[in-house]
């Protein structure tokens, strides 16, 4: 089996999984997921956040069951299960998916910047600058990427505190009567919700980079539970602050909530909020971008640097295809759907296939 | 080699500077209040914007002065474009503090113009809305020079009255009630005279249309039934003693109790003081109880009249429909609309006198 042993200078402690998972999950989705889940499941949609938190925890446990050896990652598993050609194809598909996520996260952030700050800003120029930053972080190695994720955790926590305003001004009775939505709708809302929980599938890529990977399970689950808690609180606060009809008219409920916060030094808090959210966006995008180039680097003879530069160029030029808000919406929905399949169908399936193959092998070994 | 590497860096700094339109505070016209009026003849809105004059020179330091622009068009952005044709600097609406609606526009419906305001990302949500009795344009152009600039004056006037007279209704709250079901918004009505700008009443809206108004003496009962209020005062005429008593409410708590699907009770508990009572002795528990009961009964009567009045107008600023939708699982908005004028709303008001003021009635001794 083609094992991957990363350089010792790139390996990080297992407790950092807590920050990595939190940073990958909390990104652009935090600004708008409430509207999307409320569209399907009404004001019982907060139950969906709990359900998806629990389901993703199960997926994390499955990932820990899949990776039995410290040096295995997704690529080696694909090789061992599907053979070289099909395995590589699947890896390439996953690499492209990760690249698409990293691009769409940046582009949808730029959309907000354009609407709020600079409508006349050149999107290509800004995207190039962002990709130079992303490339710089990713080529610096996994430790730098994790460092950024660590940093992003504190920024998102700081911003989450400012949702208190919704708690103060809102009507708690908005979420009553409880369980008034059919259970199918609550389940269907998992699809838009899973966009906000994406990120745990990347563990399969960076597993070899975690020291004593097996002991990291509790940190990974902790990180996931913290993001579910953040989403739950966020959903309840936003549901308190807006009523069910109003929320559908608002693109970014969180940003509109920040509009009401008046501090003595900042009259309109959302400007600060959007700017600080930059860190969270970059952290998410970097982890995906890094995973994408890692996938390709493992199966092709090219260097990380070459692949990185090529992908960054693809990222910059993708703006000519993803050039308006409708396409951004479409791609986001596509990613949610792919993510849902990867998390809740592909990873459990991989686990089952792996178990079956191992069972067959051990049976043959006995005979 | 090092130098060659530096060149793109330096170049990028130079080239990036001019990318985006800058907004220098001295070169923009900071619009702080906009008033809208409706022209029924050609179905357009007239927008009047005022911007404070920030002393171009020290002599011109009269802070109350402002400059006015008007534009006439069918949409919010187009009005801004028309206003721009009169203004020497780029107009910016990011610091808007008040939006005023003329009476005619309020009667016609404000939701179209609000739609445009909500779409503009640079406008905040914590700004004050008000209906102007008469024309908004007249108020903004002719109001007297006050101690603050007119926009700040109206902002402070409404914000401070929100504390102890009228419930708060900022742009977010207004949007909330406009979009939601089982609720209707309301707005303060302001009027100008030769000497001042005052709040004269509360405009009750049916969806987005101004239908009727509440006078100042109804503010107290309205606040009681609408929210948990604080620090309000109420003048109560005590029939039995033939005199007026001023009641101060320190705070009040309100809750909506559904007895059945067409019977609702608004429970209000007021904890208050006797603010002006030099004619009444308040020496024994029975006297205290008598006053408490008299006030409660009087307020219940007033409350009943108010809810009847609102039901007759078929509007729901007290958000009783919203409460019903949170209480009943099978709430249906069409059915509710038919049902609302017929339901029984009973205000159940309980006044608790926490303390009286320090003065005692001359010649009377304590009974304790």
Image (tube, rainbow, N blue to C red):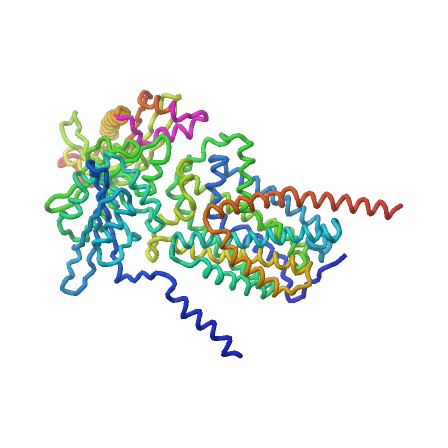
Location of residue A4 in the rendering, given as x and y in whole percent from the top left corner: 71, 60
- Outermost residue toward the right? A367
Position of residue B90 in the picture relative to residue A287 (left or right)? left
At horizontal 31% and vertical 24% (from top left) the residue drawn is: B346
Q: How many labels does the image show?
A: 0
In depth, the one of A148 and A315 nearer the eye is: A315
Task: Give the x, y percent position of residue B303.
Answer: 26, 27
Outermost residue on the left side: it is B194
Residue A95 position, x and y percent, is 62, 54
B327 relative to B231 in the view: left or right:
right
Q: Image quadrant for the N terminus of chain A?
A: bottom right
Position of residue A284 measured from the top left corner of the image (x, y, whole percent)? 54, 55
The residue at the far front in this view is: A320
Q: In which quarter of the image is residue B287?
A: top left
Q: Magenta includes B281? A: no
Picture quadrant where residue B109 is located: top left
Query: Is residue B328 within the magenta segment?
Result: yes
> Residue A24 versus residue B236: which sits nearer the camera?
A24
- Name above or below for residue B281 compared with residue B79: above
- Pick whichever, A225 or A277, lies toward us: A277
Q: Is residue B312 visible?
A: yes
Q: Give the range drawn in magenta.
A: B313-335
- Between B354 and A259, the one lying in front of the other is A259
Image quadrant where one finds the C terminus of chain A = top right
Q: Residue A117, can we see it?
A: no
């Amino acid at each position: 089996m083609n094992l991957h042993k990363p350089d010792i200078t790139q390996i990080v402690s297992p407790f950092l999984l807590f920050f990595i998972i939190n940073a990958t999950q909390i990104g652009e989705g935090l600004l708008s997921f409430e509207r999307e889940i409320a569209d399907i499941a009404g004001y019982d949609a907060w139950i969906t956040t709990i359900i998806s938190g629990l389901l993703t925890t199960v997926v994390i446990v499955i990932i820990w069951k899949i990776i039995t050896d410290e040096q295995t990652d997704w690529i080696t598993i694909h090789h061992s299960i599907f053979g070289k050609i099909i395995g590589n194809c699947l890896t390439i598909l996953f690499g492209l998916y990760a690249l698409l996520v990293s691009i769409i996260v940046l582009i949808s952030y730029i959309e907000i910047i354009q609407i709020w700050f600079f409508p006349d800003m050149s999107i290509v120029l800004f995207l190039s600058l962002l990709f130079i930053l992303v490339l710089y972080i990713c080529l610096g190695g996994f430790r730098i990427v994790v460092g950024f994720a660590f940093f992003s955790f504190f920024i998102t926590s700081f911003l989450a505190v400012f949702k208190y305003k919704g708690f103060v001004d809102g009507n708690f009775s908005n979420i009553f009567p409880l369980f008034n939505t059919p259970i199918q709708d609550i389940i269907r809302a998992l699809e838009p919700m899973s966009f906000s929980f994406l990120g745990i599938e990347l563990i399969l890529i960076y597993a070899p980079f975690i020291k004593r990977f097996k002991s990291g399970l509790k940190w990974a689950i902790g990180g996931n539970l913290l993001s579910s808690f953040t989403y739950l609180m966020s959903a309840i606060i936003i549901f308190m602050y807006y009523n069910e009809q109003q929320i559908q008219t608002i693109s970014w409920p969180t940003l509109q909530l920040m509009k009401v916060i008046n501090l003595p030094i900042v009259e309109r808090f959302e400007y600060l909020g959007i700017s600080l959210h930059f860190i969270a966006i970059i952290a998410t995008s970097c982890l995906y971008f890094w995973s994408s180039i890692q996938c390709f680097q493992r199966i092709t003879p090219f260097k990380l640097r070459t692949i990185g530069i090529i992908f960054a160029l693809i990222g910059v030029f993708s703006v000519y295809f993803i050039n308006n808000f409708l396409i951004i919406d479409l791609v986001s929905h596509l990613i949610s759907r792919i993510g849902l399949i990867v998390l809740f169908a592909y990873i459990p399936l991989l686990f089952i296939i792996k178990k079956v193959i191992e069972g067959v092998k051990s049976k043959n070994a006995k005979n | 080699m090092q130098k060659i590497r530096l060149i793109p860096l330096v170049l990028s700094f130079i080239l990036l500077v001019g990318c985006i339109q800058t907004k220098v505070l001295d070169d923009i016209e900071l619009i702080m209040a906009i008033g809208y009026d409706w022209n029924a003849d050609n179905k357009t809105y007239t927008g009047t914007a005022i911007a404070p004059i920030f002393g171009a020179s020290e002599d011109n330091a009269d802070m109350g002065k402002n400059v006015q622009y008007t534009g006439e068009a069918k949409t919010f952005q187009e009005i801004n474009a028309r206003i721009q044709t009169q203004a020497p600097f780029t107009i910016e609406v990011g610091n808007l503090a008040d939006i005023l609606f003329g009476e005619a526009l309020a009667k016609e419906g404000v939701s179209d113009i609000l739609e445009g305001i909500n779409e503009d990302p640079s406008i905040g949500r914590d700004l004050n809305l008000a209906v102007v009795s008469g024309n908004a344009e007249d108020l903004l152009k002719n109001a007297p020079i006050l101690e603050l600039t007119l926009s700040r004056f109206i902002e402070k006037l409404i914000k401070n009255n929100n504390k102890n007279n009228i419930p708060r209704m900022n742009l977010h709250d207004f949007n909330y009630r406009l979009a939601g079901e089982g609720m209707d918004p309301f707005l303060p009505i302001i009027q100008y005279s030769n000497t001042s700008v005052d709040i004269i009443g509360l405009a009750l809206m049916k969806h987005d249309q101004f239908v009727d108004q509440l006078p100042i003496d109804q503010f107290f009962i309205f606040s009681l039934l609408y929210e948990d209020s604080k620090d309000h005062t109420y003048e109560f005429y005590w029939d039995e003693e033939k005199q007026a008593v001023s009641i101060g409410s320190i705070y009040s708590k309100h809750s909506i109790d559904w007895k059945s699907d067409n019977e609702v009770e608004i429970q209000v508990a007021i904890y208050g003081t006797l603010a002006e009572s030099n004619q009444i002795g308040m020496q024994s528990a029975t006297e205290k109880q008598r006053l408490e009961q008299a006030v409660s009964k009087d307020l219940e009567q007033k409350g009943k009249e108010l809810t009847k009045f609102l039901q007759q107008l078929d509007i729901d600023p007290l958000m009783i429909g919203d409460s019903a939708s949170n209480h009943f699982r099978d709430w249906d908005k069409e059915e509710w609309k038919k049902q609302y004028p017929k339901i029984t709303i009973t205000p159940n008001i309980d006044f608790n006198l926490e303390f009286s003021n320090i003065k005692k009635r001359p010649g009377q001794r304590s009974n304790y």
